[in-house]
Amino acid sequence: MNDNKKDVIDLVMVYKHLMAKKRRFLKVIPIVFVLSCVWIFPEPRYYKCKVTLAPETTGENIAGGLSSIASQFGVNLGGASSDAIYPLLYPDLMESNNFMIGLMDIRVKSADGTVDTDYYTYMTKLQKKNQLTRPFKKLAGAVSKLMESKDDVATPKPKDGKRIDPFRLSKKDYELVSLLKTKITCKVDKKTDVITITVEDQDPLICATMADSVRQHLQVFITEYRTNKARLDVEHYKKLSVNAKKEYEACVKEYSDFCDSNQEVTLQSFVSKRDELENEMQLKYNTYTAMQTQLEAMRAKLQERTPAFTTLQNATVPIKPAGPKRMLFVLGMCFIATFLTAFWTVRKDIFEKPDSYTAGQPTDSADEP
């Protein structure tokens, strides 16, 4: 009987005990409120812009009507598409270093006109920061420098004129690319293949500009990938067509010169030579027309392979900031402080002397707040 009573806590007595120590809460909560406000209000606001796309699907669906049924359960059966990069892989594509580095040269301009530069300079030198966190960041940077190995070699700059070498990133560039991966995200709906691109930034105009630029970069990359083989075929048949035309024109000139220089000659050798040149000229013409036909076919295939993207939601300059949620942060910190203070007040009675509550006697009644 005694063991069972020890496991029961009288909540009424807990409440009375907390009310007896309410002065402790009246001291802790205002302090936490002020410190939360001091910490969160200097934090720069940020905005979010969202763009949604619907890509064109290619290839015959070998699954038939099953794909439409499976899509209702979040399963994409795919089809007989020959593309190695399909919509579900677009988020992985956008998280690649090459894609992120390709965004660095985009020109951005702030809403107030004070910033007009490329995205790399804006991210590395013109970002607003919370001044209260600067000492902590400096301390963390100093500690990280102490932890670095002396054998570390500085990363050489790229020789092709680019700012960042995606093959060999420096520590600063790696941190920048990692930051961009958190600010620029891509999600794909498995049921509809709708692509959602979200960009977060401190300036609303730059946020919308980057969202639209990321959409364009993604479309260009997918278009170049999908049409790479067709573009190579077009260039190949264009060269063959040009060479065939030159050979045909040279053969026509040789035939014409031969006929002009032997107009009144009726020898059989002349007739045979003329017929030979004429046949060769006809073969060159047939080759030329065949190459022209193939070239037009490859151009049509290139146009067919060029994907189409339907923009469901265009980039718009956000009006209201997406965060930080200052009031929620302050209220959350006050709630946590209240909970921890209450737990600290009754910790001894719960863990050390549970009998006191069952008997209706708080153990720390003599404890002053």
Image (spheres, rainbow, N blue to C red):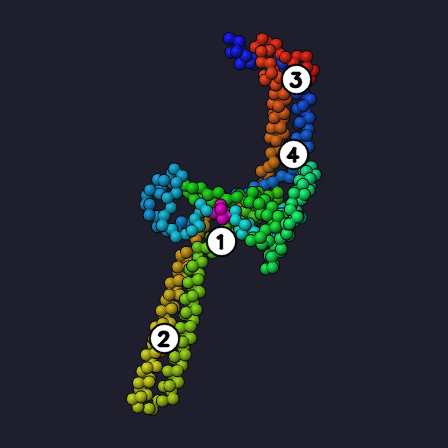
The answer to whether the residue labelled 4 contacts the one labelled 3, judged by CB atoms less than 8 Å apart, is no
Is 5 displayed left or right of 145 in the figure?
Answer: left
The answer to whether the residue labelled 2 contacts the one labelled 3, judged by CB atoms less than 8 Å apart, is no
Q: Label 2, secondary structure: give it.
A: helix
Q: Which mark is residue 40?
A: 4
Along the polypeptide, which appears first: circle 4 or circle 1? 4
What residue occupies the far left of the structure in this picture?
Answer: 268
Along the polypeptide, which appears first: circle 4 or circle 2? 4
Q: Magenta residues?
A: 90-94
Residue situated in front as seen by the camera: 212 or 37? 37
Residue situated in front as seen by the camera: 139 or 95? 139
- Magenta stretch secondary structure, dominant: helix
**Gap between marks 2 and 1 measured at Cα:** 40 Å
On the image, the x and y values in percent for residue 177 come to 58, 47
The residue carrying mark 3 is 22
Is 176 displayed left or right of 235 in the figure?
Answer: right
**Gap between marks 4 and 1 measured at Cα:** 40 Å
Along the polypeptide, which appears first: circle 2 or circle 3? 3
The answer to whether the residue labelled 4 contacts the one labelled 2, judged by CB atoms less than 8 Å apart, is no
Quarter-of-image position of residue 294: bottom left
The residue carrying mark 2 is 284
Task: Give the class, few, some or many, for how many residues have Cα within 10 Å of label 3's Cα (few <14, many ≥20).
Answer: some
Residue situated in front as seen by the camera: 239 or 352? 352
Q: Which mark is residue 221?
A: 1
The answer to whether the residue labelled 3 contacts the one labelled 1, judged by CB atoms less than 8 Å apart, is no
Identified by mark 1, the residue type is Phe
Q: Label 3, secondary structure: give it.
A: helix
On the image, the x and y values in percent for residue 188 come to 46, 43
Is 245 displayed left or right of 91 in the figure?
Answer: left
Quarter-of-image position of residue 142: top right
Identified by mark 4, the residue type is Ile
Identified by mark 2, the residue type is Lys
